[in-house]
Amino acid sequence: MTDGALREPTFLVLTALAAGPRHGYGILLEVEQISAGRVRLRAGTLYTALDRLVADDWVAVDREEVVDGRLRRYYRLTDQGAARLATEVDRMRANTRAAETRLRARFAGGTA
Amino acid sequence: MSETQERRLRRLLALYPRDHRERHGEEMLGVLLDSSPGWRDAVDLVGGAIALHLRRLFGLDGQVRRRDVLSVVSLLGPIVILAGAAADVREAAWWLLHDNMEPLPTWYVPDAPAWGAWLVVAFLAFFGQRRAAAVSAWLALGAFVVVTPILSQGYLLRSAGAGYLVLGAFTAVALTWSPGPVHGRMLAGKWAVPLAFGGDALVLAAMVLHSMMFAWWLAFAAMALTAHLACRAVRDRRIGRRAALVLALPPVTFIVEAFAGPWAYGNPYLRDIAFYGLPTLIVLLGMGILRPVRRRQPS
């Protein structure tokens, strides 16, 4: 796999769907919660991302409902999308570990 | 939520590509109405619409077969190229209308052999003779490159006419390596060919009825309109858009000449970049041939 780092909105959308299917507005709320309010996706950005994620088979439509006369479409993470998210998590974990090690050494050196 | 706001949101959603609008329009409206949209959402919607149009235009959605686009070009390309003959037809008409008794001199219509060859290509393609059309197209392209410079000092190739040469090259490639004009006709529907011929007629009328400079603008506007309309007839709009990009090469080089000609003429390298490199690059990008290697990474 030659994939590079995911951009943050993509990572957060995939993470929002990791626990189970969600509709568009649900994804927006979940992303805001995951990022502790730091990232607030908007509809244009969300559906641009979903357009590509669905085209790449990382996300699929799970089901549709009509609520108060409005279409509500639920999306789910595919196995391929879950594998990509797991790869990204491993990559981030490795980076985080390396950063932690170096920071620990730096602080240890600084206080000695 | 007021009806005014919903109308405003619908206007913004109308900016999105049609396929996206049909699939997600109502759904997006629902999400927007749930989230009390403000001006930042409006800006975000416009940005999303632009991003999706660009993605479709430059083939990044990866769902359009280039062979299908080339099939449409193999059918319509030879017909669109014929519009380039309008200037020679205008000159020939002037010669005949002024009761010249002598035969029409070749220097008066210097590019006639090339246009004649493309007329043959257009007929062969129209009647589904792909192989014969492909061979003829390469010969016609050769006529552009070899004969035209001898007869007209290569004016056609050193000006906006370069668009015909580049379109000719794409058409020859399309006739040689795509499923061909019969497949193109299936994709294009019944109106594309009449519209393309109609465009030729419009260009000819513009050339014959108006003064030269105005006629050129009118002719290239007619060509751009024809490319657009003919490709709107294609059932899959994404295939149509990419085919239109190829067919619109002559108007593109005309516009390049209008704006960049004065400085491009002074330097043959700049001229070649402006008349050949730039339009070719645009088409290759549009066909998705030069798309980024890592296009399958959502971001």
Image (spheres, rainbow, N blue to C red):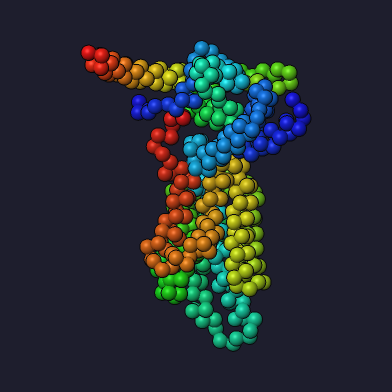
> Where B16 falls versus B136 (above or below)?
above
Q: What residue lies at 54% left-to-right and 60% top-to-bottom?
A: B255
Q: Nearer the viewer, residue B132 or A109?
A: A109
Horizontal relation, residue B87 to residue B198: left or right: left
Question: Residue B103, image x and y in percent?
Answer: 55, 83
> Where B96 falls versus B268 (above or below)?
below
Q: Nearer the viewer, residue B138 or B204?
A: B204
**Where does the N terminus of chain B fall, quadrant-wise?**
top right
User: In this view of the protein, can residue B134 be seen by the observer?
Assistant: no
Q: What residue lies at 28% left-to-right and 16% top-to-bottom?
A: A107
> Where B277 falls versus B235 (above or below)?
below
Question: In the image as oriented, which residue stretches furthest toward the front?
Answer: A111
Question: In the image as oriented, which residue stretches furthest toward the right?
Answer: B3
Disc tally is 0
Q: Nearer the viewer, residue B264 or B284?
A: B264
Horizontal relation, residue B80 to residue B201: left or right: left
Horizontal relation, residue B21 to residue B120: left or right: right
Question: Residue A97, image x and y in percent?
Answer: 32, 16
User: In this view of the protein, can residue B216 be seen by the observer?
Assistant: yes
Horizontal relation, residue B22 to residue A92: left or right: right
Q: What residue lies at 51% left-to-right and 12% top-to-bottom?
A: A19
> Where B85 falls versus A48 (above or below)?
below
Question: Residue B24, image x and y in percent?
Answer: 63, 29
Q: What residue lies at 76% left-to-right and 28% top-to-bottom?
A: B2
Question: Residue B112, image x and y in percent?
Answer: 51, 71
For residue A23, which quarter of the picture? top right
Q: Nearer the viewer, residue B281 or B35?
A: B35
